[in-house]
Image: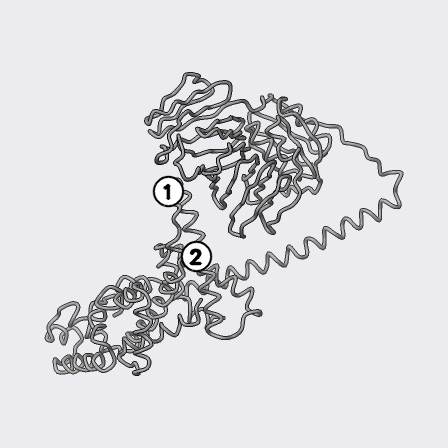
């Protein structure tokens, strides 16, 4: 169960967050979904797609209920709940969460030293000399690491994806 | 969940890593042109659009979440264990009592305890009272305000003897909204601009426009109300509630929605109720009971409409349900003793127009519970 939890927790929280835009409540919703899943585990096939369907559906329904309640509380504002209910929108949100998980994996698999130097060089704008000083390595090493990082990028990633990578301070 | 969903996610991931085969590229392109939103999704991964997403993901601590999940699960299992054995214990206790009764019929008499209710004061029953909130936000106390009101859009509102009447023949766009708020120990009637009459019970709210547009008539309700909807085949009448919507076609019905086990009763005509659990159409004399298993059944009209006719009508109601109604009509706070439990079904009818002490005497006698009434606090005494 723990393995399953660690595997799906992040993406489900991201999915819930896409729907309700509240990190805290998203985690609560996913927490509840896992409790339900745990109870029903025996009746759910031990197959990734089946498990993900169950979890995404449970989370989706909880989010929709929350949205609906919020709208009523907002003094009967809009009865147009349609956009949230439309299947395409929900499916695309699931796709996004799944891909985000993959992106995270790609980035995390870059060698750690690379990641660090990448961040310092491209994001913090330190010169090779400054980086070398900070990490107590030679400027040559810095240059090599940078090259290696770029090589990994070029080889493995779509160029359109570079900017996302480079701008992402959160990951490094 | 379309079976395609995870496949597309996989294709997109491959796209980002520049590792799509020719067939896969085609497949992905096919999906992209299917819907404009699909194209938007692909674009959202480019450049730095997805940064916020990644940051959100980073904030989440899954180890901590796992610990929390384990803890909660243990709690739930413990609770279930106790519940399971508590009912067994209760059953055995009852069985034991019944066995003992067989042997001690002389000693066992139905001797009602001397009723020791304490009344430090009495409480008047509910009255005709309500507040009207105009579109401007202004609150008008209808009990004291008997003068006619004119709303911003020219609607004439008259207030006489517990009936609020709206006069506006227009049908262009929907009118501005007012809210009729019934407090505890209150009740009121309202005649809407289309001729629909609504009776409202304590702790209810009706949110409605000064006039309806030409296509439909929609009002919003919280609590309990009895509707006499004016016939207008061109404009269906809708009652929107927190978790359901009632579609009406010229008819009389009652909605009781104080708790999760909501009840809608049809007297005459036809209604359709759309809830999370599905859509239900009622025939006259039927009721829809929502809750654990939502179902349509034959209604006890005298019971469900009793409030409108000035009575309490209990039929196998449990003690708490009875107390809830008392609490609303007399505006008292009911305080239960610790570990309070009872399993009696109450049946009987009492007038709503009497003072609280009289009602309590009857309930006390039937239930063997003793009350203490102080101010507006009604305490059920510990045995």
Name the residue that disc number 2 marks: A28
Q: Is residue A149 left or right of residue B112?
A: left
First of labels 1, 2 by sequence position: 2
Q: Residue at x 54, y 27 (%)?
A: B185
How busy is the neighbourhood of tag 1: few (under 14 within 10 Å), some, or many (20 plus)? few
| Residue A136, quarter of picture | bottom left
For the residues labelled 1 and 2, say whether their Cβ atoms are less than 8 Å apart.
no
Q: Is residue A13 left or right of residue B109?
A: left
Q: Is residue B19 left or right of residue B94?
A: left
Q: Eyeballing the image, is A28 above or below B3?
A: above
Give the tally of numbered discs.
Answer: 2
Mark 1: secondary structure = loop
Nearer to us of marks 1 and 2 is 1
Q: In the rendered structure, the residue with mark 2 lies on which chain?
A: A
B60 or B283: which is nearer to us?
B283
Mark 2: secondary structure = helix
Q: Eyeballing the image, is B239 above or below B365?
A: below
Residue A170: % across, % down: 26, 66
Residue B224: % across, % down: 54, 35
Residue B78: % across, % down: 59, 59
Q: Eyeballing the image, is B325 above or below A148?
A: above
Q: Quadrant of the N terminus of chain B?
A: bottom left
The residue sitting at the front extreme is B234
Name the residue that disc number 1 marks: A77
């Amino acid at each position: 169960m723990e393995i399953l939890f660690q595997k799906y927790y992040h993406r489900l929280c991201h999915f819930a967050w896409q729907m309700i835009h509240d990190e805290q409540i998203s985690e609560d919703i996913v927490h509840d979904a896992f409790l339900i899943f745990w109870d029903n585990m025996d009746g759910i096939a031990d197959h990734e797609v089946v498990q993900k369907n169950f979890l995404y559906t449970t989370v989706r329904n909880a989010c929709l209920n929350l949205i609906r309640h919020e709208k009523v509380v907002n003094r009967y504002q809009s009865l147009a709940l349609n956009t949230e209910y439309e299947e395409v929108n929900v499916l695309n949100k699931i796709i996004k969460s799944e891909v985000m998980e993959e992106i995270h994996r790609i980035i995390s698999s870059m060698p750690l030293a690379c990641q660090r130097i990448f961040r310092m060089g491209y994001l913090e704008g330190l010169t090779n000399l400054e980086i070398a000083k900070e990490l107590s390595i030679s400027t040559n090493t810095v240059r090599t690491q940078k090259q290696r990082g770029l090589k990994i990028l070029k080889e493995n990633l779509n160029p359109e994806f570079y900017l996302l990578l480079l701008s992402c301070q959160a990951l490094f | 969940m379309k079976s395609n969903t995870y496949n597309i996610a996989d294709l997109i991931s491959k796209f980002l890593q520049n590792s799509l085969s020719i067939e896969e590229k085609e497949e992905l392109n096919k999906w992209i042109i299917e819907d404009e939103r699909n194209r938007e999704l692909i674009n959202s991964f480019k450049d730095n659009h997805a940064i916020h997403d990644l940051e959100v993901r980073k904030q989440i601590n899954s180890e901590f979440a796992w610990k929390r999940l384990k803890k909660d699960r243990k709690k739930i299992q413990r609770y279930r264990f106790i519940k399971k054995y508590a009912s067994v214990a209760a059953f055995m206790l009852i069985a034991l009592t019944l066995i003992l009764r067989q042997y001690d019929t002389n000693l066992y008499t139905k001797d009602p305890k001397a009723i020791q209710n304490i009344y430090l004061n009495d409480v008047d029953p509910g009255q005709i009272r309500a507040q009207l909130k105009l579109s401007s936000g202004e609150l008008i106390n209808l009990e004291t305000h008997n003068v006619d009101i004119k709303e911003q859009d020219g609607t004439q509102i008259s207030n006489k003897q517990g009936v609020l009447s709206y006069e506006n023949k227009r049908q262009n766009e929907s009118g501005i909204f007012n809210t009729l708020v019934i407090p505890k120990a209150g009740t009121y009637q309202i005649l809407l601009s289309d001729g629909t009459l609504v009776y409202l019970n304590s702790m209810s709210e009706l949110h409605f426009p000064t006039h309806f547009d030409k296509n439909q008539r929609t009002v919003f309700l919280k609590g309990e109300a009895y509707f006499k909807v004016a016939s207008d085949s061109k404009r269906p009448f809708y009652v929107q509630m927190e978790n359901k919507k009632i579609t009406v076609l010229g008819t009389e019905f009652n909605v009781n929605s104080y708790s999760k086990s909501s009840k809608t009763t049809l007297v005459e005509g036809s209604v359709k109720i759309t809830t999370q659990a599905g859509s239900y159409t009622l025939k006259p004399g039927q009721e829809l009971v929502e809750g654990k298993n939502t179902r349509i059944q034959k209604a006890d009209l005298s019971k469900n409409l009793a409030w409108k006719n000035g009575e309490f009508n209990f039929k196998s109601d449990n003690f708490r349900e009875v107390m809830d109604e008392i609490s609303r009509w007399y505006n008292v706070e009911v305080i239960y003793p610790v570990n309070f439990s009872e399993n009696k079904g109450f049946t009987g009818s009492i007038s709503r127009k009497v003072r609280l002490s009289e009602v309590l005497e009857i309930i006390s006698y039937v239930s063997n519970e003793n009350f203490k009434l102080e101010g507006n606090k009604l305490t059920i005494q510990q045995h």
